Structure formats: C-alpha cells, structure tokens
Amino acid sequence: MSLTSSLLIGRSALTASQLALQVTGNNIANVGAAGYHRQGVSLAPTRGDQSNPGLFVGRGVSVADIRRAIDPALQTRLRAGLSDEASAQVGASIMSQLESVMGELGDNDLSSELGRFFNAFSELANNPSASINRSAVVEQGASLASFVRRLRTDLADQRDQVDRELGAGVERADALLDEIASLNLAVVQAELGQGTDGNLRDQRDALIDELSGLIDITAIERESGAVDILVGSTPVVLGTASRGLEPDFRTVNNDVEARVLVTESQEAIKLTGGRLGGLLAQRDGAIQQTIDDLDALAGAVIFEVNSLHASGRPQARITDTAGSRKFAIADQARAFNDPANTTIAELPFGPRTGSFRVVITDQNGNRSEQTVFVDLDGIDNAGAASTANDTSAAGIVATLDAIANLRAEFTADGRVRVSTDSGFDVSFADDTSGVLATLGINSYFDGKDATDIAVRDALRQNPLGLTIGLSEGTNETALAIAGLRDGPIASLEGDSLSQRWQKTVERTAVGARAAATQADAAATVRASLEAQNAAVSGVSLDEEAINLINYQQQYAGAARFISVVNELTDILLNLV
C-alpha cells in the first residue's frame, strides 16, 4: 500500500464525515419544522485491494445511503387516525349544531308549540261558544305552522351549509391531488431510482397527510418513488397524473343528493372517513333524517287534524267551498291509489278504503244524509289486481254532484268545488276514508308537509268556519283533535304526534353525545400515533449532539491522519 493510497483513505474519511456533519446540521436546523423526517447517514467501508498475497487492505469509508427515519406501517396508521379524527370532529360539530337548531331545551320549541296547539283545542272543547277560544285555536295553529316551516328552513339551511363546505373541501382535495402528482414527477426525476430525496418526499407526505384529513385514502409507493393514491379501490392519482375530484349535486325525487365524482371517469366514490366523509355521513344521516321526521310529523298533523275537522257543521255554514288540493287533469280520472297519479304520489298521506257521510240541511233545520263509499282495495270487478275500478277524484265529484241540492265540479286549477242550492248548506261526518282531508275540503290546514303547512286562509279570515262539533253547541270534533296529542297515529307506526317528535329529539341528543365521545376518542388515538411517529421520525437534539461530536472527531482524526501521511511524504522526498 502506498502513501498515496493512504492519502485517498484520509480523503474518503474527510468526505464522509463532512456529509455526515451536513446531514446532522440539517436535522438540527429542521428540529421545529412540521412534517420533517429525521435523516440518517449509513457509512460503509470501501472494498479493499489485495496489496500482497493473502493481504487485503481497505480503501477507506464511503456514505452508503442517506435515508429518512420512517415507519411506513405507522405512517399508514397515522393517516387513518387523521381521517377518523376529522370525520369524528365533523360529526360532533354538526350534531351539536343540529341540537341547537331543534332547541328542545326551553319553552320555544316544537314540543311546546304542539302542546299549546292541542291545549287550545281542549279549551275550545270546554267552552265551544266562546269566540275568543275560536280565535285562539286559529292563531295557535298559525303559530305552530309558522314554527314548523321556520324549523324546516333552518334544517335545510344547515344542509345547504354542509353542501357548501363539501364543495370547498372537494375543491381543496382536487388541488392536493394535482400537487401530489407534480411532486411525484419531481421525486422520480430527482432520484432516478438511486437514493431518496428526503425534502421532496417530506413535502409530498405533508400533502398526503392533509389529504387524509379530507378523505380516507390508501397510498401505495411505486419502485420509481411515485405514490399512487386510492379511495377505496378507485385510483385518484396514478403516478404523475391526477384523475381529479369534483362535487355533484343532483335532484332525485325532489331531494338533492350529494356525491363526489372522479373527474376523469365521472365515477362516484364512496367516502367513509375524513372531513368530506363526515360531512356526507351527517348530511345524509342525522340532518336528512331529522328533516324527514319533521316532514312526516307535519304531514301527519295536517292529515289527522283535517280528517277530524272535515266532520261537523261549522257556525259559518258551508254553501260554497273548494278543496285545497290541485289535481292535474290527467290525475282527476285516475284512482287515488294508481301509481301514475302524481298528485297523490307526492303526498305523505292519502285516502284509503272507507266512507263518509254527506249531510244536507235546509233553512228549517231539516236534514238529509247520504253515504259515499270509497273503494281503494286495488282489485277490479273481475277480482284481478288492478286500480281500474277504484275510486278517483272524478268519481267523488260525480257522486257528490248526484246528491240532491248539491253540486260538485273541478275548478279551473283542478280543485274539487262543492256548492249547495239556495237555502241549503252541506256538512260531512264520519270520514273513515281520509278522502276529505286529501281533497282539502273543509280543512283546517293547507299543505302537505313541513315546507308548506299553513292554516287555511278562510279560517284566518273568519274563525266561525272552525268545526267544533257535529252540530251547533257540541264539541266532538274539538275533543277528537285535542286527543291527537297522545293518541296513536297509524301513519306514525302507532306513535302519537308528541311521542314521534320526542323520539327524534332523543335520537339527536344521544347521537350528539355519542359523536362528542367518538371525537374525543379519535383525538386521543391520533395523538398517540403522532407521538409514536415522532419517536421514530422526530429530531432529538441530544442524539444529534452526540452524532455531531462523533463526526467532528472523525473529521479531526482524518485530518490528523492526512497530516501524518503528508509528513511521511516530505521525509521520503527529502531522502531523495
């Protein structure tokens, strides 16, 4: 081995220690940098030469690799933790907002409004002749309807806010996919299959971590160093190309559905985690379910109250009235239970097989009665399954029009109009079919659900049109309506009106508590995973200080070694 070889060995030691010192300095400089992964130097002896038979002498040291300290499995778990926490936090926030919107903690809530409404009918039943009680019933009904509409609007506004957040989140996720694809290209070009560019990879990992907070993803690294991103089994980043994401809001059966699509293929992806997954879950879950419950409750209130209110003879005699339901021309002749009857199909309620009585009273108090039967069994005259022979709105009009001193027709806008000859008035009783409530004849409420519930204008203008009993001075109708508060309702699966809304309130309260607990648990898991990740990838100043001393000593030793070899070279040259 020559002195020149010794100098080269010394130079390799100087070079290796310099690189090691640079890496150590870079670690120390980035000790406070978020997303930075500690880098480590791997030193390896250079393969030796055989200077003499049987003797191999080393040629110094080299830097074998500079790698980030990272645990891929732990990183995957941490990203799942970030996704779970973001989803849970969204759930807790939305459920808390939903509780606030419902406001069932005081006297200004739907439960209280329902109670005041039925109490008003109860007081009217106790004193049916008091005009102040009539006005109170009408105004309390208007207050209930206004409250329901406002609550429905507030819930819809909350859903719209979620939609706006969803759109903004998808836009950010799409931008992250573009940036990740660009960094994939930068990593591939920088590394060329040799070594790792820690800084570029750290930038990319930070973006992937942020993306994990938005959507639940799987990251798969290629041999080239690029990372593919998948949502479920659907790729959204393939190598250096982003396939893009976009929000999609479409109307289906009068409801707005929200989806997230892959821009390139227009394929809908299923999000189960992350902020966007949480928004979708709460939008289509708690918020929509509460809206549906409110609509069902309002529809039941409208139908049940109207069914009872239609039976009886108000003080303001009925001589000419029109129902509130507008039938399309094509639907007038279709059976009520015909699936093609869109007027009925869009209602949360409808008629059933039964009957009602029509009572014609003259100016002397003489009465004549006729029963109208309603057939909605779905079986025709031949015994086959068909609605061909079932009752339609046109059939009801024809039957009513055939009654003496009574006329019936469709108005220009499709409503059923009933009028009497001079000196007569009409009233109804014992409607077991629900046809009168469906047509909106002598109704208390207009509308079909929480979006449009309202007290009938004619009642607001003249409370004497309120039906209190089957005849003047009686209170059967008012008592029956007051009993709806706690009585079982078939359309609500046997629950009363109060019980059904209380179930919604309880479900929301339980859901809010569960969401808050889940958010706390997810935050704890994420914090634990971050601590584990920091233990693997974080910079320890104590450890780096030790490395600094070691590499400094290595550099000093190599410099001293070169100095000794230099002195020996000078001695050798002086001997010549």
Image (tube, rainbow, N blue to C red):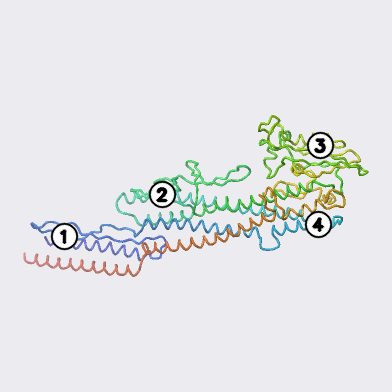
View extreme (left): residue: 576
Q: Amino acid at mark 2?
A: Ser
Disc 2/disc 1 C-alpha distance (Å): 43 Å
Q: On the rendered structure, is 556 left or right of 476? A: left
Q: Are marks 2 and 4 in contact (CB under 8 Å)?
A: no
Residue at the disc numbered 3: 400
Q: Position of residue 348 (x, y in %)?
A: 68, 45
Real-space CA distance between mark 4 and mark 3, rounded to the nearest whole angstrom: 33 Å
What residue would you read off at disc 4? 136
Comparing labels 2 and 4, the label whose residue is closer to the camera: 4
Left or right relative to 394: residue 543: left
Tell me the distance, in whole angstroms, between the alpha carbons under discs 3 and 1: 114 Å
Q: In the displayed image of the protein, which residue is found farthest to the front?
A: 383
x, y percentage for residue 480?
A: 78, 52
Q: Quadrant of residue 61?
A: bottom left
Residue 58 got which mark?
1
Whether residue 10 is visible, yes or no, is yes
The quadrant of the picture occupied by the N terminus is bottom left
In the image, residue 298 above or below residue 570: above
Q: What separation in Å lies between label 2 and label 3 (alpha carbons)?
A: 75 Å
